[in-house]
Amino acid sequence: MAAVQDIKRRIRSVQNTRKITKAFELVAAARLRRAQARIEAMRPYADRMMELMVETARASTSVRGLPLLQRREVRTAAVLSLTGDRGLAGAFNSQILRQVFTIERRLRSEGVQGRWLVSGRKGASSLRFRRYDVDQAWIGFSDRPAYTDAAAIAHKVCELYSEGEVDSVILVYNHFVSPLVQRVVEQEILPIPESLFEADDDRDAALTGDFIYEPEAEEILARLLPVYVETELFRALLESAASEQGARMTAMRNASKNAAELTDSLTLAMNRARQAEITQEILEVVAGADALTA
């Protein structure tokens, strides 16, 4: 009887766990829909921001003096990783950290010193546990980032680059493809790539109109470049938030499925144990009857 009672307790425990994982799955699904809506709402702003910056750059007589466009020999690189504040999201955080460690080995082999910036409590704690010297960590907004959060991060990385403390800023985040697929992206956000200002027929067709710039285009561009970095970081934060919710929804769905399968297996084991006990009791009754009639 003890075996049957133990299996019953395990079944109740697994069923309670399944209720929790199912609730997490539903919450993650609702947050994922909101995150996708935010990404779609942000895209027109990002596209228009890019068009405005390109048009202003082409109207400028020279862009070489702008700090965020200056390219120099890379001796120190800052690696900015976007992780989550919580776990239970499958490989969402671990694949970002694996990419960060890969970048660290590559920088070391090239003789480049690395500096570490991180968004998300999980990434910060993992890097510090491995004795990485984290310059700054931003936490508390991984599931619902605001533009002000991106602006704070952008201000820090632009300051590091403008003052010459770092020669490159590498952004590592999860790009949302689907709830089942999140692709790790490694993007150099500083210096701002010169390829953005190269000719593009499709983009040129969208840039129609004759503009008069006041103040000068160079001064406007100097103001737009930090905003571009903020926009890129905000887009990456939104992608990361959607990826986190998609990964958590998938992980919790798999956990619920595994819990259901384990419940079925334990139920079958409990029925077999109960049947064995009944059989044993019948055999004991038959043996007692035979002993009385002997």
Image (cartoon, grey):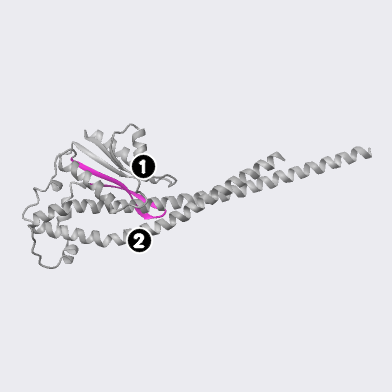
What type is the residue that disc 2 sits on? Ala
* Mark 2 burial class by Cα count in 10 Å: few <14, some 14-19, many 20+: few
Q: Are marks 1 and 2 in contact (CB under 8 Å)?
A: no
From the top left corner, tell me how far across and down residue 284 is, in percent. 83, 40
Quadrant (top left/top right/bottom left/bottom right) for the N terminus: top right
Region rendered in magenta? 167-188
Q: Residue at x 15, y 55 (%)?
A: 197
Image depth: mark 1 or mark 2 in front = 1
Q: State the image quarter where residue 108 is shown.
A: top left
User: Dot 1: what SS?
Assistant: helix
State the residue lying farthest toward the bottom. 209
Q: Is residue 22 left or right of residue 44?
A: right
User: Which element type, helix, strand or loop, lies under badge 2?
Assistant: helix
| Kind of residue at disc 1 | Arg
Residue 164, position as x, y percentages in the image: 15, 39
Q: Quadrant of the C terminus?
A: top right
Q: Residue at x 63, y 46 (%)?
A: 266
Magenta highlight: main SS: strand
Quarter-of-image position of residue 94: top left
Farthest residue in the right direction? 294
Residue drawn at 41 percent across, 50 percent down: 247
Numbered badge on residue 129? none
**Front one among 145 and 116:** 145
Q: In the rendered structure, does residue 108 fall within the stretch colored magenta?
A: no
Q: Is residue 221 left or right of residue 254?
A: left
**What residue is pinned by disc 1?**
121
Residue farthest left in this picture: 61
> Image quarter for residue 27?
bottom left
Packing grade of label 1 (10 A; few <14, some 14-19, many >=20) is many
Which residue carries the number 2 mark? 37
